[in-house]
């Protein structure tokens, strides 16, 4: 702690003398007044308007660090989403090496993502920099099930411990979803599709922008009659009830310059979903429903003080409310009427000092307040809890001659309940000139504070409080190589290793149970990917992830983590026609279910499976594109969660029209 204190004192000292430096450098020209992040905006391809991946600024780093300068980042672009015909973010994340996706079902069924086998709560999920993890859940997880892709510009994934920048929860990594920013002449884009399970989606986007003002506003709805989320056992007499999904959503992003050195950015997302659910594995329920409202918003004021210095103040808020209704329809059906509301408010003050793209220093202070409200209308219980954290962080990024890049970060958080927590990350990368070999590594330490649910329980009916809980800790590293070959291919191979201690788990040895620090978990393996473009019209890509997980307390692997996972895709582009075929193999993995007749948890092994999809697009005119997709074309019957259904062979067709 002492060393960190010294570090922060030095930073505070630097901040205190900074205005003097500013006073000497007040001759800044209008050219750099839009801010260093804007000034470093990457060049675009004049024909396609696309940004080369190497030049994409990874905004999750909070400064102007590009993909080429980073060590352990994956980016999914809007083009990747469009060519694969992905309708939900959960579908596209499975294409990233090192990420595991587990859904109970599609159409609103819980979709959990594991980064390199870490628990789904060991991850910070951001939408345009706003943390959207659901505070009222057991592990502050984020459910990707309800996030449509049509307003998304790119998804940034930083793997490995990232608590140095984002504090608690970022132990496995972070996922930042960046929504579309308006540019160019005002345009209206209409999007619609229809397909299997009586699925329809309609959305409209209006966007535009220049150097002083930009805006993008999307609104839409999705509706599906669906299929039964619970799988039907062979001996079940009656058919299982279909579980529908209905969602309305809106997102907006705005930026404007009221006076020359200021830039104001603001944005929001709002979703309201009605999800029909089932009771448990192989157990149907005709009248069990969830209503979920998810909101997030931010406002950032950036102030360019000098060509090398920018400061910003951001205020964020996010809120997830889940309401569950279940009416009694049989001896084993427990009625329910519960509401879970999680809210997160934060404010951040950031200073970015950038020295001619050679050195970028980012320092900041962040205050975060989390609130959880759980109400059980049938039991008449209602609990409210909150916690707050003040974090101080600094990150320095060096680019030495486009050969050596080092990003190093340190953070100290003062948590209202758990006191001071420290985190750090160091990520070096070396690009060897001529052969362009990129050697990269990442080492870090992070922590995850217990959730309000784990500390205070649910009011006492199933979980009682445990105020002796302490934060989980982890250390992790990865080391990898990226190699372009003959300018037609890129290969990537990374070894990773993470250790988690004091992991929190439910202790059911007494009733009601409680959460305790018990587990030590290790996850390690390697992730590899290759992209080959032998012809301009043809792209082949593939990825393989080998993952070992070990609960060192029980010597068992973690549930639902496949040891082997393969992704492959082939894209052919001929003039205005593009076709993309993808194949995903998920190896066998452990699962478990609760047997309500014996009151015990039963271990099972889920079979491996291969799923193939084909998506195609054709530009009828520059303004009108028709797209179609066939999913699960071999009609493979498979489960990602024991006793729950995944879609059979299904078809979708849609249109995108742009009016300008
Ligand atoms: Ca059902
Ligand atoms: Ca029911």
Image (cartoon, rainbow, N blue to C red):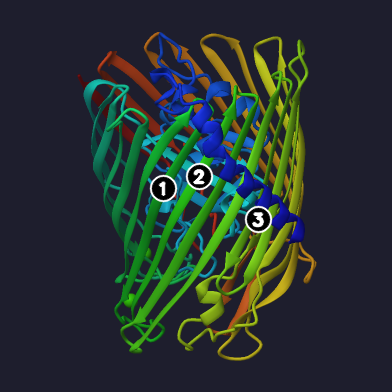
Give the camera-side residue of 364 and 606: 364
User: Which residue position is annotated with label 2?
Assistant: 350
Q: In front of the other: label 1 or label 3? A: 1
Residue drawn at the location 29% of the way across and 25% of the way down: 212
Answer with the quarter of the image where residue 620 lies: top left
Residue 80 in sight in this render: no
Sequence-first tag of 2 and 3: 3
Where disc 1 sits, the SS reads strand
Counting from the top left corner in percent of width and height, residue 84 is at 45, 30
Give the camera-side residue of 147 and 299: 299
Where disc 2 sits, the SS reads strand
Where disc 3 sits, the SS reads loop
Residue drawn at the location 25% of the way across and 37% of the way down: 217
User: Which residue position is annotated with label 1?
Assistant: 314
Q: In front of the other: label 2 or label 3? A: 2
Q: Residues within 10 Å of mark 1 (few under 14, many from 20)?
A: many
Sequence-first tag of 1 and 2: 1
In space, the residues marked 1 and 3 are separated at their CA atoms by 29 Å
- State whether residue 231 is above or below residue 615: below
- Determine the quadrant in which ligand 1 lies: bottom left
Looking at the image, do the residues carrying marks 1 and 2 touch, with CB atoms under 8 Å apart? yes
Q: Quadrant of the C terminus?
A: top left
Answer with the quarter of the image where residue 273 lies: bottom left
Q: Quadrant of the N terminus?
A: bottom right
User: Which residue position is annotated with label 3?
Assistant: 118
In space, the residues marked 2 and 3 are separated at their CA atoms by 29 Å
């Amino acid at each position: 702690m002492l060393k960190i204190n010294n570090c922060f004192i030095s930073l505070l000292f630097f901040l205190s003398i900074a205005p003097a430096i500013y006073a000497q450098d007040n001759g800044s020209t209008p050219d750099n007044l839009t801010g260093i992040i804007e000034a470093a905006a990457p060049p675009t391809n004049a024909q396609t308007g696309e940004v080369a991946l190497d030049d994409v600024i990874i905004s999750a780093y909070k400064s102007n660090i590009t993909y080429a300068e980073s060590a352990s980042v994956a980016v999914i672009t809007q083009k990747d989403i469009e060519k694969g015909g992905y309708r939900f973010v959960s579908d596209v994340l499975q294409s990233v090496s090192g990420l595991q996706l587990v859904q109970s079902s599609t159409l609103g069924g819980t979709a959990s993502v594991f980064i390199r086998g870490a628990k789904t709560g060991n991850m910070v999920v951001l939408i345009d920099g706003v943390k959207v993890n659901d505070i009222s859940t057991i592990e502050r997880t984020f459910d990707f099930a309800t996030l449509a892709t049509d307003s998304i510009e790119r998804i940034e994934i930083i793997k490995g411990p990232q608590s140095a920048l984002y504090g608690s929860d970022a132990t496995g990594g972070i996922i930042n979803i960046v929504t579309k920013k308006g540019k160019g002449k005002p345009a209206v884009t209409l999007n619609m599709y229809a397909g299997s399970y009586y699925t329809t989606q309609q959305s409209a986007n209006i966007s535009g922008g220049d150097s002083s003002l930009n805006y993008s506003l999307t609104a839409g709805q999705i509706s599906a009659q669906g299929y039964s989320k619970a799988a039907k056992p062979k001996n079940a007499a009656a058919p299982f009830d279909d579980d529908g999904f209905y969602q309305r959503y809106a997102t907006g992003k705005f930026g404007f310059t009221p006076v020359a050195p200021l830039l104001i950015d603001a944005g929001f997302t709002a979703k309201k979903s009605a999800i029909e659910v089932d009771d448990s594995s192989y157990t149907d329920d005709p009248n069990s429903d969830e209503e979920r409202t998810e909101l997030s918003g931010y406002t950032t004021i950036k102030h360019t003080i000098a060509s090398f210095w920018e400061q910003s103040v951001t205020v964020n808020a996010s809120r997830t409310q889940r309401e569950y209704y279940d009416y009694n329809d049989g001896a084993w059906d427990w009625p329910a009427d519960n509401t879970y509301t999680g809210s997160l408010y934060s404010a951040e003050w950031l200073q970015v000092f950038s020295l001619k793209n050679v050195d970028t220093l980012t320092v900041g202070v962040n205050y975060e307040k989390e609130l959880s409200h759980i109400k059980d209308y049938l039991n008449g219980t209602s609990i409210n809890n909150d916690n707050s954290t003040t974090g101080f962080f600094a990150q320095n990024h060096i680019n030495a001659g486009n050969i050596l890049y080092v990003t190093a970060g340190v953070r100290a958080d003062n948590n209202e309940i758990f006191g001071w927590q420290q985190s750090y990350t160091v990520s070096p990368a070396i690009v060897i000139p001529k052969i362009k070999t990129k050697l990269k590594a990442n080492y870090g330490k992070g922590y995850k504070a217990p959730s309000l649910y784990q500390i205070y329980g649910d009011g006492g009916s199933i979980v009682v409080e445990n105020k002796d809980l302490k934060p989980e800790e982890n250390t992790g590293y990865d080391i990898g190589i990226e190699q372009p070959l003959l300018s037609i291919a890129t290969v990537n191979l990374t070894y990773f290793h993470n250790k988690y201690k004091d992991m929190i788990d439910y202790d059911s040895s007494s009733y009601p149970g409680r959460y305790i620090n018990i587990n030590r978990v290790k996850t390690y393996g390697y992730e590899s990917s290759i992209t080959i473009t032998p012809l301009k019209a043809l792209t082949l890509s593939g990825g393989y992830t080998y993952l070992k997980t070990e609960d060192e307390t029980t010597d068992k692997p973690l549930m639902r983590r496949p040891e082997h996972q393969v992704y492959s895709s082939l894209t052919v582009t001929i003039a205005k026609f593009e076709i993309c075929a993808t194949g995903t193999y998920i190896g066998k993995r452990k699962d478990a279910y609760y047997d309500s007749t014996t009151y015990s948890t039963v271990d099972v092994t889920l079979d491996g499976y291969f799923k193939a999809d084909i998506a195609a697009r054709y530009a009828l005119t520059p303004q009108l594109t028709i797209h179609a997709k066939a999913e699960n074309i071999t009609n493979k019957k498979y489960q990602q969660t024991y006793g729950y259904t995944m879609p059979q062979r299904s078809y979708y067709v849609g249109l995108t029209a742009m009016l300008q």
